[in-house]
Amino acid sequence: MKFRVIAIIVITPLLLSFQIQTSHAVDKVGATCTMVGSKSIVGKTTLSCIKSGNKLVWAKLTDPTPTPSPTFTCPDGSCGNPNISVPLNPSEISKLKKEIEALQAKYNSTKDPKEKEKIKKKISEAKSKLP
């Protein structure tokens, strides 16, 4: 038992002294590197190993600025806005006016109150489409 304790006391410091020391120098712009094309990230900066003359050095990668995507704008400004109505062309306006006149004539000739209410709704819908 004493032999085992003595062995542990002697071997433990020896094992601890042989631990591999990992020391990694922080890469920075202009410092030497070992292989062209290798990359290193330091904080928010990405470094790349390039050949400058006869030396291999770390250079900062430039992030390409993103190009803004083109946005589509409607010529009349009505895209996506339900409150803006698209202007009608003259032929559509004249068709709506004729339709309203025909509905008004039908309204005047009808005696059924339910039919008159339906026609009245159609007239108001047609008038709402006019500019």
Image (tube, rainbow, N blue to C red):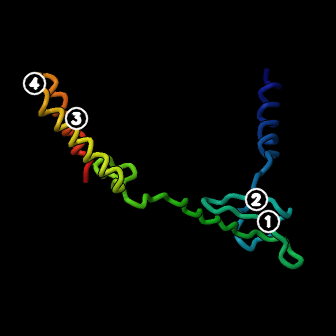
Amino acid type at image mark 3: Lys
In this picture, is 48 found above or below 15?
below
Horizontal relation, residue 95 to residue 118: left or right: right
Assess disc 4: are there few (<14), some (14-19) or many (≥20) residues with their C-alpha within 10 Å of its C-alpha.
few
Amino acid type at image mark 4: Lys
Q: Residue at x 89, y 77 (%)?
A: 54
Assess disc 3: are there few (<14), some (14-19) or many (≥20) residues with their C-alpha within 10 Å of its C-alpha.
some
What is the distance, in whole Å, between disc 3 and disc 1 at their CAs?
75 Å
In this picture, is 122 found above or below 53?
above
N-term-proximal mark, 3 vs 1: 1
Pick the front one: 23 or 124: 124
Q: What element carries label 1?
A: strand
Q: Which residue is drawn at 64% across and 63% down?
A: 45
Amino acid type at image mark 1: Cys
Residue 52: x %, y % from top left? 83, 76
**Residue under numbered circle 1:** 49
- Do the numbered discs 1 and 2 sit on residues whose CB atoms are within 8 Å? yes
**Residue under numbered circle 3:** 122
Question: The C terminus is located in which quarter?
Answer: bottom left
What is the distance, in whole Å, between disc 4 and disc 2 at their CAs?
87 Å
**Residue under numbered circle 4:** 111
**Residue under numbered circle 2:** 39
In this picture, is 20 found above or below 65?
above
What is the distance, in whole Å, between disc 3 and disc 4 at their CAs?
17 Å
N-term-proximal mark, 4 vs 2: 2
Pick the front one: 57 or 116: 116
Observer-side mark, 4 or 2, equals: 4
